[in-house]
Amino acid sequence: MEASAPASTVSTNRRPYQQAARDLLRESLLDAAAELMADAPWSEISMAAIASRAGVSRQTLYNEFGSRDEFAQHYALREADRFLTTVEDAIGDDPSDPLQALREGFIVFLDAAENNPMVRHIVVRDPGADELLSLFTTRGGPVLELATYRLTLKISSIWTDADEADARTLAEGLVRMAISHASLPGTSPARSADHVVALLAPFIAQALGDSSNH
Amino acid sequence: MEASAPASTVSTNRRPYQQAARDLLRESLLDAAAELMADAPWSEISMAAIASRAGVSRQTLYNEFGSRDEFAQHYALREADRFLTTVEDAIGDDPSDPLQALREGFIVFLDAAENNPMVRHIVVRDPGADELLSLFTTRGGPVLELATYRLTLKISSIWTDADEADARTLAEGLVRMAISHASLPGTSPARSADHVVALLAPFIAQALGDSSNH
DNA sequence: GTTTTACAACATAGCATGTTTTGTAAAGTT
DNA sequence: AACTTTACAAAACATGCTATGTTGTAAAAC
């Protein structure tokens, strides 16, 4: 019935401008939500408020993201993604001093976890507070898996002679320690990082130095 | 005014029987609460129900423990204490195989955390569930500190040649890892324990073998 | 392509109600 | 002397009702 349209979806092949405009719209909406989230918890932010803040009608919001839940998921994923990138950047690309690199990444994480409201919502299950974004955090499983996965890649890419399994073990341990210190802080982020690095240093030394594995 | 009573409090110096009777009463009440807690969350258990279950009047309960909150705290503390004892027993007293000993303790903890309802209330902040016992868990800080402290003592007492600071670092790491795996389980307790032991083994080897510290 | 207007379904906040539970006190029982 | 029974005020909680706000969808207007 349709004459000229190819067999793919409408949104897949689009002229660059339209694609860019669409992305801009979505980003603006997510940004608007982020701004509102600074003042009020998710449960108190209406779709109307988000649209209005972005200078757009409520209907446009619903056209872009199907529902309130979908929008929340997109928002949470974008935030988690940005966050992991920040940590990866803090680790850097220099393989010469692994301990210092991991320490940096750890501190960046804990500092952000203290300030960034979104991260607080993901990491800490605040009972009397926000809840609602835990739609997708309900069990933090997905986030932990994503973070472990990306950190494993990062470690493997920098210290190429490390065993893959060792990298994964280390990554998961780091992520769990990071989440633990974020939700139950000891003293300062720097001191927490020192403790964790002291605890894991022997493992790292062994994994990096000991490449005589089977 | 008082003739023969010495200057100390009434409850401090008491004849053995009376002291024992009092302890028995308190334990019976705490046991009754534990039994009820198997079927319903704390918020749904009334003081009347606890007293009745223990075969005692409500007034006696209030005479022993001043209020509902106080009772909850005593209950939670007793449970935490028992729990730590169980873990310490699992670790044992044999200094010959530290890795296996810690693995045992870890598995015992995770198994109990899965089953024991009380531990679940302490460790995991279940949003849609029980809440109320988090009066004293609100921030798990106290529990984490107690557990870290006792585990440090345990480690130091078995492996006497280990550095005190190392013992504490290890203890806190173990506790945080245990809580992390209890609230976000990976696969099975045994596999979680294997991962953690693998990660911390190098640190343990260094701390125990390397007693040439300053 | 976006906005406006409209609307049904659902969720939320407030309120008046009756019931339960807490915490305390005094009198009765063994 | 310790426990139970009875009694009671204050607070917490459940219930049913109404009013208001929000979500999600659709159609007409710009």
Image (spheres, coloured by chain):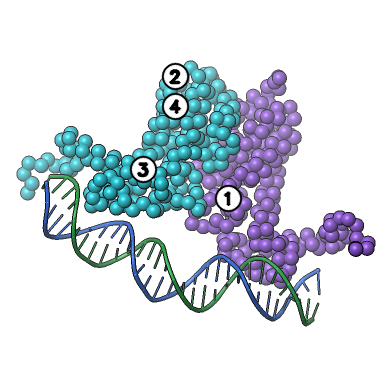
Chain colours: A purple, B cyan, C blue, D green
Instruction: Say which of A36 and B62 sits in front.
Output: B62
Q: Looking at the picture, does residue B73 appear above or below residue B175?
A: below
The residue identified by callout 1 is A138
Q: Position of residue A145 (x, y in %)?
A: 65, 41
The mark closer to the camera, 4 or 3, is 3
**Whole-number angstrom distance, CA of label 3 to CA of label 1:** 28 Å
**Whole-number angstrom distance, CA of label 3 to CA of label 2:** 33 Å
Q: Chain of mark 1?
A: A
Callout 3 amino acid: Ala
The mark closer to the camera, 3 or 1, is 3
Q: Is residue B1 left or right of residue B152?
A: left
Q: Earlier in the sequence, mark 3 or mark 2?
A: 3
Query: Is the C-beta separation of discs 2 and 4 under 8 Å?
Result: no
Question: Which disc, if any, is residue B90?
Answer: 4
Q: Looking at the picture, does residue A165 appear above or below residue A23?
A: above
Q: Say how many tags the image has.
A: 4
Q: Position of residue A81 (x, y in %)?
A: 69, 49
The mark closer to the camera, 3 or 2, is 3
The residue identified by callout 3 is B34
Query: Is the C-beta separation of discs 3 and 1 under 8 Å?
Result: no
Query: Is the C-beta separation of discs 1 and 2 under 8 Å?
Result: no
**Whole-number angstrom distance, CA of label 2 to CA of label 4:** 11 Å
The residue identified by callout 2 is B94
Q: Is residue A31 visible?
A: no
**Whole-number angstrom distance, CA of label 1 to CA of label 2:** 41 Å
Specify the farthest residue to the front: A1
Q: Chain of mark 3?
A: B
Callout 2 amino acid: Asp
Going 78% across and 59% down the picture, which residue do you hit? A23
Judge if badges 4 and 1 mark residues of a common chain: no
Dot 4, how many residues are within 10 Å of its Cα: few (below 14), some (14-19), or many (20+)?
Answer: some
